[in-house]
Image (spheres, coloured by chain):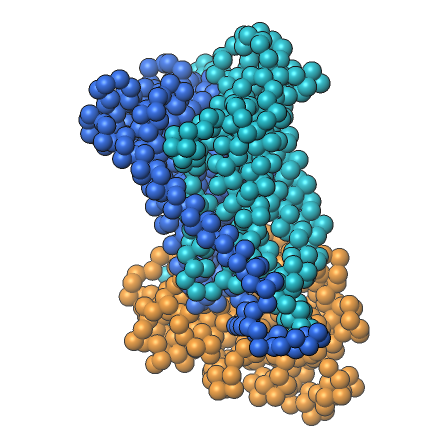
């Protein structure tokens, strides 16, 4: 330090804060205390000013905490540390603020849904029950959802799978590029537009009535790109050495794909298809346009209006009576449970099969 | 795609059966290739059919419209003098999506950073998992929750906004049920939060360690590391994640249909009822529409289709550019 | 601008695994100290404990004392950020910030540490790039991205970035292992010039390099795979390579193992 203090070095040394490894820091207990004070102040202000919603209380507390820590840190530790602390508190606050509504959503659904959710609810339809009265069930909606989603899967899964095989195993040149591009485009189609398309062709032009199958076609359009995308990803994970090893044995290409490539990636592909099923199970808009929503059990998806779980939720909400609200929540709970189970099983399969893809 | 250069033409070694090797393609291969290529073509045909049929029905509707389809502030598609236009719908869709993006993107980036760089390591991966699960909650459930839980809890906040910001006109509030475009925006924000978070988190986790260490070794604080190496690296990823979220917000039907109290007028105040969105209008007008009315709704659906195509196209472009860029700098 | 490092009783861990065991040594100011030893002997880990980068790795933990002149880097109340400002580092693979221009890369550290006038920044950037023997090659394209340079130029850019903030010590973690022989030579020459101003510690796999550039050499070894690395000996480079006092060092130098 003392030897080489030439002019240029001094200039730099002057323009920054003196070098010190130790910095004055806030004691560890400051932040929790500050958080408590902020929450207390938030509740206090809320009570004093008579603000009726907890949303405001939370916002006041969060704001106080963020600003408070920033000012305190700036005073004690300096500007750079204060900015760092500000970023940390903002990130934490963002996380907590987002957790609240998402947790509330799950909590409300479970709490309000379990009220009428029982064996009777699951095994009966609405029948001729007036909407304002308690009772009734979702059996017809469950049947409808299972049939519509099943049909959609029967259409979309093979088409999607084969398209993905084409793109990964054969695809070069313009056609593959065009298909890839339109798979992307298709992923972004709003579900109601898919519904409108089937409506315009199947019902308005060809003159068929509403049916579960009409809904299935719209759902299949929504499902296909998802299956293509996920299958593509999985097929790309299969190491080329495997294919080459098989081809080198004189096994034809198509048998290589069927016997080597697909079995290797079957876990991931199954996961992708199940996630796609979970996604279309919750779709309401196309079903609203094409299936219409019957109150009674219709086991035939090819003829006449059916019901489906998401549509049932919507229609019960529309009725606007306490009894129908209860049914809407209960059906929503059934729907969430169904989708979550599908998701968990799908991810479970992905994890269980993961080592086979060579990781 | 990255498969060996000539797989289809690769000469199969002489088979054990001793058949002539002059045959270029076996029947099995031909059938299989035909099937898989056929599926790809089927997908293209479906896309073309969607565009064609929607356009066809829209032309029927718009030519029967007795007023300007783009500027009319009304939706009356029945009777002999049908007058309908998408001005209100465009306004409502735009406003609710913008509100949703303004809320969701910063919060999503915050959560993504929280998971990738702030949360205790043991918490980080379960959190990511939960966020992915939340992305799977059906939109109708968000709609139900929004209508029966969120709406009653927002009127207090809106009164507050009115007290402090009512003078702007945008935030004036006349104490009705909070079933307005702003509420829709908040609900849409909550809905797209998981997907935007999930994609952003992926990008943040991909930031090469050496870039972060470069900043650390210069004596950067955690925030400075994020600003110097994480955010620049992840910027295009966040943009495309936001576009994907925007695509969802634009086309969302049920959550809007349950929350919004539709009124066919453009209201400067976002907290009072007013406006509608393309998707919501289709869902709520559908049951009372005759064939011509359905065509009119299809016409508005076509507009929505084109808008989402543009938004998604932009997102894909950004992702593609990012790939080139990260390939060059690797 | 250079300080002495005095390490005593230093242990470093990755989670439950002990990576280096009870290391004590002194690094002299304004000289080059080289760390050599077989892979996995903990020399890079030890290097990273000297500017508190080790604790950034998941599970990384350090015990012991590292004195920089009279301040303990691991003392209570010491800010790791300030430590890294004082002890600069150059990494194995060149890592310029990919989104920043050459100029911004060099100025990055300065901008963190306060406000500078434009002319001041320009001075420091020019001086640092000259110090890293890169100025003549890049002076016409300071606004181009740093990732467009060759590997050797990128590494010198990283050195310029590190010395721009005038650290007391410069740590180099195998700085030439990703470079071709000509770029390596350029960096080695540069190290010889930089030691006039900085305390330099360099980890290298290349024994000829250690012999060429360093004044003192420390040899690290580990008893077996999975065992923690230890410092075997540290001495004048000449002595280590001609007449080491420990048999293991001699075996390693003469290529009998490792």
Nearest to the observer: residue C29 or residue C58:
C58
Whether residue A34 is situated above or below residue A263 in the rendered picture: above
Q: x and y percent of residue A74 in the render?
A: 45, 44
Q: Is residue A270 left or right of residue B174?
A: right
Q: x and y percent of residue B270 in the render?
A: 33, 25
Chain C: colour as depicted: orange
Viewport quadrant of the C terminus of chain A = bottom right
Residue B181 location, quadrant: top left
Report the number of numbered marks. 0
Nearest to the observer: residue B167 or residue A234:
A234
Nearest to the observer: residue C74 or residue B62:
B62
Farthest residue to the front: give it.
Answer: B19
Colour cyan maps to chain: A
Q: For the point 62% across and 17% down, which residue is it? A: A125
Q: x and y percent of residue A145 in the render?
A: 59, 29
Q: x and y percent of residue B4 in the render?
A: 55, 71
Q: For the point 36% across and 50% down, which residue is it? A: B314
Farthest residue to the left: give it.
Answer: B67
Residue A13 location, quadrant: bottom left
Whether residue A338 is situated above or below residue C218 in the rendered picture: above
Q: For the point 47% across and 49% down, which residue is it? A: B42
Nearest to the observer: residue A339 or residue A5:
A339
Chain B: colour as depicted: blue
Asked if residue A348 can be seen in this view, the reply is yes
Asked if residue C166 can be seen in this view, the reply is no
Q: For the point 55% across and 7% down, which residue is it? A: A130
Whether residue B190 is situated above or below residue C8 in the rendered picture: above
């Amino acid at each position: 330090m003392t030897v080489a203090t030439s002019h240029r070095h001094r200039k730099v040394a002057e323009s920054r804060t003196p070098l010190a490894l130790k910095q004055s820091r806030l004691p560890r207990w400051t932040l929790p205390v500050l958080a408590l004070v902020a929450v207390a102040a938030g509740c206090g202000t809320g009570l004093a000013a008579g603000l009726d919603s907890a949303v405001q209380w939370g916002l006041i507390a969060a704001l106080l905490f963020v600003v408070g820590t920033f000012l305190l840190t700036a005073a004690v530790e300096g500007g750079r540390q204060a900015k760092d602390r500000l970023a940390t508190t903002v990130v934490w606050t963002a996380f907590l603020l987002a957790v609240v509504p998402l947790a509330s959503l799950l909590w409300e659904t479970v709490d309000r849904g379990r009220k009428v959710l029982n064996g009777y609810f699951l095994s009966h339809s609405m029948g001729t029950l007036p909407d304002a009265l308690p009772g009734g069930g979702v059996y017809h909606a469950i049947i409808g959802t299972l049939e519509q989603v099943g049909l959609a899967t029967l259409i979309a899964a093979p088409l999607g799978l084969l398209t993905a095989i084409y793109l990964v195993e054969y695809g070069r040149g313009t056609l593959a590029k065009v298909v890839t591009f339109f798979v992307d485009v298709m992923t972004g189609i709003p579900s109601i537009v898919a519904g409108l398309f089937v409506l315009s062709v199947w019902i308005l032009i060809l003159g068929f009535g509403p049916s579960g199958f009409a809904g299935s076609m719209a759902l299949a359009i929504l499902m296909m790109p998802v299956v293509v995308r996920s299958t593509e990803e999985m097929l790309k994970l299969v190491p080329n050495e495997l294919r080459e090893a098989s081809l080198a044995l004189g096994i034809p290409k198509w048998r290589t794909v069927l016997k080597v490539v697909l079995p290797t990636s079957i876990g991931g592909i199954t996961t992708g298809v199940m996630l796609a099923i979970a996604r279309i199970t919750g779709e309401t808009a196309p079903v609203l346009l094409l299936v219409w929503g019957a109150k009674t059990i219709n086991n035939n998806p090819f003829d006449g209006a059916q019901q489906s779980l998401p549509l049932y939720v919507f229609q019960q909400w529309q009725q606007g009576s306490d009894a129908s609200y209860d049914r809407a929540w209960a059906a929503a709970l059934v729907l969430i449970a169904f989708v979550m189970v599908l998701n968990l099983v799908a991810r479970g399969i992905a994890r269980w099969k993961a080592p086979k893809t060579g990781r | 795609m990255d498969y060996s250069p000539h797989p289809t033409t690769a000469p199969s070694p002489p088979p054990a059966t001793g058949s002539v090797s002059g045959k270029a393609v076996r029947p099995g291969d031909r059938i299989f290739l035909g099937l898989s290529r056929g599926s790809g073509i089927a997908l293209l045909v479906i896309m073309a059919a969607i565009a064609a049929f929607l356009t066809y029905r829209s032309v029927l509707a718009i030519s029967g419209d007795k007023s300007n389809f783009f500027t009319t502030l009304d939706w009356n598609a029945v009777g002999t003098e049908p007058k309908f236009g998408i001005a209100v719908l465009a306004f409502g869709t735009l406003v609710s999506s913008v509100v949703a993006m303004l809320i969701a993107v910063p919060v999503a980036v915050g959560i993504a950073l929280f998971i990738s760089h702030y949360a205790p390591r043991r918490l980080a991966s379960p959190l990511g998992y939960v966020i992915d699960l939340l992305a799977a909650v059906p939109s109708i459930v968000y709609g139900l929750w929004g209508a029966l839980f969120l709406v009653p809890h927002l009127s207090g906040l809106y009164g507050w906004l009115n007290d402090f910001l009512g003078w702007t006109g945008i935030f004036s509030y006349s104490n009705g049920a909070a079933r307005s475009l702003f509420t829709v925006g908040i609900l849409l924000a909550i809905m797209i939060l998981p997907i935007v978070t999930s994609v952003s988190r992926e990008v943040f986790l991909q930031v090469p360690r050496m870039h972060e260490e470069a900043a650390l070794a210069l004596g950067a604080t955690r925030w400075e590391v994020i600003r110097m190496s994480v955010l620049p690296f992840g910027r295009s990823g966040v943009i495309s994640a936001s576009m994907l979220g925007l695509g969802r917000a634009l086309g969302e039907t049920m959550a809007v249909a349950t929350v919004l109290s539709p009124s066919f007028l453009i209201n400067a105040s976002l907290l009072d009822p007013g406006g509608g969105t393309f998707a919501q209008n289709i869902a709520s007008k559908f049951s009372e529409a005759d064939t011509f009315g359905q065509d009119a709704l299809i016409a508005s659906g076509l507009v929505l289709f084109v808008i989402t195509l543009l938004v998604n196209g932009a997102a894909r472009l950004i992702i593609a550019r990012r790939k080139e860029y990260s390939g060059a700098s690797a | 601008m250079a300080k002495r490092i005095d390490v005593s009783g230093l242990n470093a861990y990755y989670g439950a695994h002990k990576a280096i065991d009870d290391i004590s040594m002194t690094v002299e100011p304004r000289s080059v100290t080289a760390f050599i030893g077989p892979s996995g002997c903990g020399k890079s880990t030890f290097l990273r404990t000297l500017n508190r980068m080790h604790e950034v790795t998941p599970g990384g933990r350090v015990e012991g004392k590292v004195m920089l002149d009279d301040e303990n880097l691991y003392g209570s109340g010491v800010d790791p950020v300030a430590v890294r400002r004082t002890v600069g580092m150059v990494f194995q693979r060149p890592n310029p910030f990919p989104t920043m221009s050459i100029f911004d890369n060099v100025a990055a550290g300065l901008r963190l540490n306060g406000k500078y006038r434009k002319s001041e920044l320009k001075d420091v950037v020019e001086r640092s790039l000259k110090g890293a023997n890169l100025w003549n090659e890049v002076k016409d394209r300071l606004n181009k991205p740093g990732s467009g340079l060759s590997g050797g130029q990128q590494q010198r850019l990283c050195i310029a970035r590190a010395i721009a903030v005038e650290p007391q010590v410069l740590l180099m973690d195998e700085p030439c292992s990703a470079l071709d022989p000509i770029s390596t030579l350029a960096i080695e020459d540069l190290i010889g010039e930089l030691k006039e101003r900085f305390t330099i510690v360099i980890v290298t796999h290349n024994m000829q390099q250690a012999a060429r550039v360093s004044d003192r050499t420390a040899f690290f070894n580990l008893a077996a795979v999975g065992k923690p690395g230890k410092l075997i000996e540290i001495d004048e480079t000449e002595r280590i390579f001609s007449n080491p006092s420990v048999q293991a060092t001699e075996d390693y130098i003469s290529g009998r193992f490792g």
